[in-house]
Image (cartoon, rainbow, N blue to C red):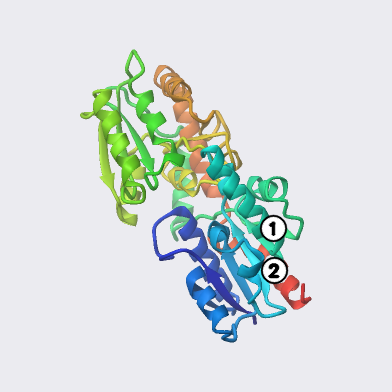
């Protein structure tokens, strides 16, 4: 069995989708008998400086750590023969950033991938971007995020089959919108808030759940925008929520809307589908690999409050559209591979790659 070190920024127990994916990958590796330890770029660099033996066969480096691993000297201390694997959620160079910042990430990511021996991606879109944008030419595989289904899966299937109509969108009370994720500009929450101010205003309320300390300045901008548009009574900022709270929010919401500038995949869209909550994402990145527009959810162009408005208006005016989407969302979740199976093929390929000595 192989010895792996997973390299991530900060605490891997944080609640972001990327961290969750990382934890599930570690669980899958350990289930196959591999030894796994978690470390940080800083710890790796200190060990390399001290010339301490690595004690591992392969490093799995979260690609988001590329600012700490892109120059030749950043990799020069790794023990000869140690395999370097990139765990890639999305490329920073694909985000909607200022020209200088985006170019810096592009420059760093291109150099990062020059040193990588193998690449694990969370979607086909991410894999394609690693090759097209970052110039990666080595072996790569895709392991999409999985789902965790309870033991009563058969009962869920039977209930859905008996219902057959999906959830009903009631306009007798405000339609409940939910945005879930760290409050950062990439998530596009400001576009969702602007959508609610388009005239004539739709009967909607919005709950925004996620870490507000990741980018306090952006959180402040969202609050100011809410006040400027006179939406204080319709918009609630919930801050960080626990897993149980997240489940309750997803179950109670009518729509899960995360209109990101870019998503490598978007685990939260899939999580919403478990409850028949209709997800709305954008066409940038891998969201289209889980959301089929007009079937189990909706896709809109990035940076388009009007497009979000039109989707909501369509569902309000034609409740059957919402019903069908809700039912199809649950069916998608029921058909989706579990975390226990989604990594199987990728890890088999990775094990063969390591055994062959790359």
Q: Secondary structure at mark 2?
A: helix
The spot of residue 87 in percent (x, y) is 60, 61
Mark 2 — residue? 350
Q: Residue at x 51, y 37 (%)?
A: 261
Image quarter where the N terminus lies is bottom right
The spot of residue 45 in percent (x, y) is 53, 74
Tell me the crowding category of disc 1: few under 14, some 14 to 19, or many 20 or more residues within 10 angstroms, Cα based: some
Note whether 250 is above or below 57 in the view shown: above
Dividing the picture into quarters, in which one does residue 316 lie?
top left
Note whether 6 is above or below 143 in the view shown: below
134 lies left or right of 89? right
Q: Residue at x 41, y 29 (%)?
A: 191
Tell me the crowding category of disc 2: few under 14, some 14 to 19, or many 20 or more residues within 10 angstroms, Cα based: many
Q: Residue at x 31, y 47 (%)?
A: 212
Earlier residue among tags 1 and 2: 1
Spatial separation of the CA atoms under disc 1 and disc 2 = 9 Å
Mark 1 — residue? 141
Say whether marks 1 and 2 touch (CB < 8 Å): yes
């Amino acid at each position: 069995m192989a010895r792996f070190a997973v390299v991530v920024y900060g605490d891997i127990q944080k609640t972001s989708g990327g961290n969750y994916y990382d934890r599930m990958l570690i669980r899958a590796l350990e289930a196959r008998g591999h030894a796994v330890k978690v470390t940080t770029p800083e710890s790796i660099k200190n060990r390399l400086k001290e010339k301490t033996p690595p004690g591992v066969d392969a490093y799995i480096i979260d690609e988001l750590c590329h600012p700490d691993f892109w120059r030749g000297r950043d990799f020069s201390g790794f023990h000869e023969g140690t395999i370097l694997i990139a765990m890639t959620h999305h490329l920073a160079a694909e985000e909607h950033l200022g020209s200088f910042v985006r170019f810096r990430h592009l420059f760093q990511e291109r150099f990062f991938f020059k040193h990588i021996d193998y690449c694990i991606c969370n979607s086909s879109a991410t894999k394609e971007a690693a090759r097209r944008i970052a110039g990666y030419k080595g072996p790569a595989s895709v392991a999409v995020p999985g789902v965790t289904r309870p033991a009563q899966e058969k009962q869920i299937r039977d209930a859905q089959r008996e219902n057959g109509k999906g959830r009903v969108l009631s306009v007798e009370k405000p339609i409940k919108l939910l945005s879930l994720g760290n409050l950062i500009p990439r998530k596009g929450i400001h576009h969702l808030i602007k959508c609610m101010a388009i005239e004539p205003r739709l009967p909607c309320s919005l709950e925004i759940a996620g870490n507000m300390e990741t980018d306090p300045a952006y959180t402040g901008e969202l609050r100011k925008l809410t006040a400027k548009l006179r939406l204080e009574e319709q918009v609630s900022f919930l801050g960080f929520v626990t897993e149980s709270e997240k489940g309750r929010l997803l179950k109670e919401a009518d729509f899960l809307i995360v209109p990101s500038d870019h998503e490598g995949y978007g685990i939260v869209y899939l999580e919403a589908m478990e409850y028949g909550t209709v997800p709305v994402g954008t066409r940038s990145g891998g969201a289209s690999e889980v959301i089929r527009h007009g079937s189990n959810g909706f896709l809109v162009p990035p940076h388009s409050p009007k497009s979000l408005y039109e989707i909501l208006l369509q569902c309000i005016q034609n409740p059957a559209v919402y019903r069908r989407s809700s039912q199809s969302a649950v069916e998608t979740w029921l058909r989706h591979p579990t975390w226990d199976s989604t990594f199987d093929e990728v890890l088999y390929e990775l094990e063969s790659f390591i055994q062959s000595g790359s």
